[in-house]
Image (cartoon, rainbow, N blue to C red):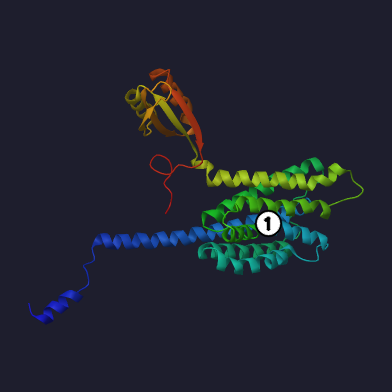
Amino acid sequence: MDEKNVNQAHILPPKITKNDLEQEAASKRGKVLYWIKTIIFLLLSSFLVSFAAHALIKPNEFTIGGASGIAILLNVLSGGAIPISAIVFAINAPLVVMSFFFVKRKFAVVTASHIGLQTLWLLVLENAFPNLIIEFSANGEKIFAAIAAGLCIGVALALAFKIGGSTGGADIVAVIIQRKFSATSISWVLFALNCIIIGSSIFVFYDATQALAYNLLPIMMSAFESYIESKTNDGITNGFHSAIEFRIITTKPDEMAKALMRELSRGVTAVPATGMYTKDEKSMLLCVVSRRQVVALKRVMKQIDPDSFAVMANVSQVLGLGFYNAEV
């Protein structure tokens, strides 16, 4: 082969196979589905936060943490002259700009999109649906507003976290502080910021003609809303894939492992162990099961080795075959 043909051979494109085309098509479908999911989650999450603030929290005279909580308090103090949407945007706009310098770009972009949509939803609700409020007249019934708001915002947070962002406000401040002071816990920063916001609500909703218990009601409702919000977010983010881990110390590892795999269809891992008091050689079996299989596992232990010793612990999330295959 002469030099010309050799050079041409080197520049020939690689042969594209059917498998390559299928992989490329699958990759494109995956990207399209990812963006569809991201847009749907952004729209739903931002709407839920806006709806909770407009229809549930403000009419029932309590607040929440973050920028939305500050916006509600300032709106009440101004007698409704300053719209919640304007305050939310004014608080979040500089924080979003700062986030591009301190946090990952994806987090900043998703959070900025969420804040923009949240502001738009609030504008729509305030102007097109001003009477769309769910107000409970009796003090004893107001707790239902806190429950409903906690559920809405808990779902909104989980959806925002699923697509790599947040609902803005205090979340951005906490992340920036944690980046600057690495020893600081984000959860504690958020807790402190939200306590300040919620605690100040007693002065905003204070009524001198009412008893102390009545004036403490906004704080108690805000705290209860935060609890429901946290539990809802946790349940959606981790709870559906939670499980129980068993560490079983036994002298019959083979029999126990076979029985567990046969009865529960779960994998078992054996780790050599030594009893430090008796110096006896034993095995520690590791097995992760769903909550509904706990009773069956205990029954197997009792049947195979009544003298076995086990430690069980809650596992917030399990990834892998038999449980949950996370999207990459």
Where residue 245 appears, as percent x and y from the top left, is: 46, 34
Q: Can the viewer see residue 302? A: yes
Q: Secondary structure at mark 1?
A: helix
Q: Residues within 10 Å of mark 1 (few under 14, many from 20)?
A: many
For residue 235, which quarter of the picture? top right
For residue 85, which quarter of the picture? bottom right
- Residue lying farthest right? 209
Where residue 213 appears, as percent x and y from the top left, is: 84, 42
**Is 69 positioned to the left or the right of 41 in the image?**
right
Kindly identify the residue that appears in the image at 39 percent across and 30 percent down. Answer: 285
Kindly identify the residue that appears in the image at 40 percent across and 43 percent down. Answer: 320
Kindly identify the residue that appears in the image at 69 percent across and 62 percent down. Answer: 122
Q: Can the viewer see residue 133? A: no
**Is 213 positioned to the left or the right of 169 in the image?**
right
> In this rendering, is residue 194 above or below 224?
below
- Residue lying farthest bottom? 4
For residue 18, which quarter of the picture? bottom left
> In this rendering, is residue 211 above or below 113?
above
Q: Quadrant of the C terminus?
A: bottom left
Where residue 202 appears, as percent x and y from the top left, is: 81, 51
- What residue sits right under mark 1 in the picture? 66
Kindly identify the residue that appears in the image at 44 percent across and 26 percent down. Answer: 297
Total marks in image: 1
Where residue 261 appears, as percent x and y from the top left, is: 35, 29
